[in-house]
Amino acid sequence: MSATLEVDLDSPVPPFEQVRSQLEAMILNGTLADGARLPTVRALAGDLGLAVGTVARAYRELEGAGLIRTARRGGSVITTPAACDASDGLPPEVSAAVGHLVEVARVHGVTAETLLSELHIRLDP
């Protein structure tokens, strides 16, 4: 992987989310191309000074979003997202942004009601 990841341990955003969101951005903007191999969980954890479970969680979430696929012996590979995610009908970029928004809101203790209210205000001019 030629791109560089950075983790700020003083950030209120959990390290797994920092790794996940940076990898997601690199996948969606084409920095990491379809078919590119990601480092093993252990290798990336070692490079970033993180626990293996932290990187494993980031990879699991990326796999759940359809951005990577992982095979036991084949490692983790980038998959180009489809134009629309069949599960929710949203473009992958929007779905990923919503997921990131929810994670950040949770970290800061924002309630679902407050978040939905803010979204309604911003979406309805």
Image: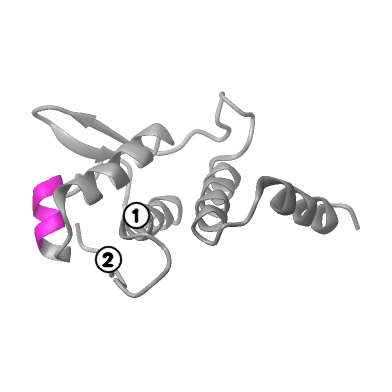
- State the residue position of label 2: 5
Which of the pair 110/6 is nearer the observer? 110
Instruction: Give the percent coordinates (x, y) of residue 26.
Output: 38, 57
Q: Quadrant of the N terminus?
A: bottom left
Q: Secondary structure at mark 1?
A: helix
At 79% across and 52% down in the image, what residue appears? Answer: 117
Q: Are marks 2 and 1 in contact (CB under 8 Å)?
A: yes
Which of the pair 90/35 is nearer the observer? 90
Coloring applied to the structure? one colour
Which of the pair 123/91 is nearer the observer? 123
At 56% across and 24% down in the image, what residue appears? Answer: 87
Q: Residues within 10 Å of mark 1 (few under 14, many from 20)?
A: many
Which numbered tag is attached to residue 51? none
Question: Going from the N terminus, do you reach mark 2 or mark 1 first?
Answer: 2
Residue at far top of view: 86
- State the residue position of label 1: 23
Answer with the quarter of the image where residue 30 lies. bottom left
**Disc 1 residue type (three-letter):** Leu
Q: Which residues are magenta?
A: 40-46
At 56% across and 35% down in the image, what residue appears? Answer: 83
